Amino acid sequence: MNSKPNPDPDQNQNQDQNAPAVERFTGQLKLSGFAEYNQRRLFNGRALICGAGTVAQVVALNLLNVGFGSIKIVGTELSKLNQLARILAPANVDQGSKLTFELISEYPLGDANRPEDLLRDCQIVVDGLAEWREKLELSDMCMQYRKPLVHAGGGGLRYQLFSMVPGRSACLRCLLSMVDMEDFTHIRKEEGSLYAMDSLVGSYLALEVVKLVGKVGASQGNELFKIDGLSGEMEVLRGLDANEDCPDCGNIRAQK
């Protein structure tokens, strides 16, 4: 992997020579609040997806279909990465995206010799992980390198969704404390999977990536969405700002 970071789209909004023509995305350009500027930001977008399950697959598919510039998917199982590559290959044809896969030894980001390379080379991180220990460690690293993290927690038919924006939002550890879910991470049970629910969650995560990178609309950076697919209920918890006493999210906020 090339450790040299790509140009920051905030500094260079020129269309990449390899990017698809803006005209191919006329449907998006007709949306209220979505302009060519936003599309070009997506062309230059760089996302890191952690995990190779169904949620990660749906996130990647949605980003490919909006013309996202670079998508790297990392996972610990070669078989799952190969399967994901086969599924996503047709969608990546002629999309102009740089879709890559990387096998790592463990999470949060692999062999610990170069996690900074993976984080330095992306603008945003997507949490498609299953284990809470890995999720929390990924949150810590994203706070350390000040990278937004789009998080999904839970499984089965119940999920919670949160966009962690360093300097604005609570970190994942503080979030769990704020909403009295600290003990939730210690509960281990096998969850079934329903594609319709995983697809809904993955699409929401992809939408947050589009909003944060493309600067489209308002991202729910300090709000937690809880979705119960069985009852059909949705709950929104607001005001989850950075905790001033936290050495991670509070310290970054104080430095802004």
Image (tube, helix red, strand yellow):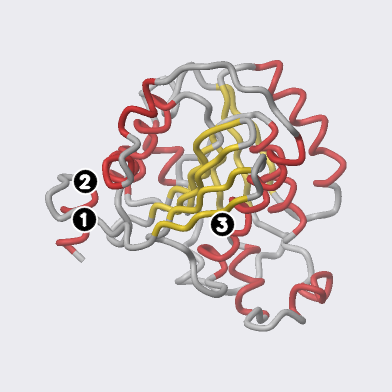
Q: Secondary structure at mark 1?
A: helix
Quadrant assignment for the C terminus: bottom left
Residue of label 3: 209
Whole-percent x, y for residue 41 in the image: 59, 68
Sooner in the amino-acid sequence: mark 2 or mark 3: 3
Residue of label 1: 252
Q: Is residue 178 left or right of residue 43?
A: left
Dots 2, 1 in contact, CB < 8 A: yes
Q: Is residue 170 left or right of residue 199?
A: left
Residue of label 2: 248
CA separation in Å, label 2 and label 3: 22 Å
Whole-percent x, y for residue 21 in the image: 79, 70
Q: Nearer the viewer, residue 118 or 60?
A: 60
Would you place residue 190 above or below residue 47 in this image? Answer: above
Q: Is residue 196 left or right of residue 133?
A: right
Whole-percent x, y for residue 14 in the image: 60, 74
CA separation in Å, label 1 and label 3: 21 Å
Would you place residue 39 above or below residue 166 in this image? Answer: below
Q: Secondary structure at mark 2?
A: loop
CA separation in Å, label 2 and label 1: 6 Å
Residue drawn at (66%, 65%) of the image = 16
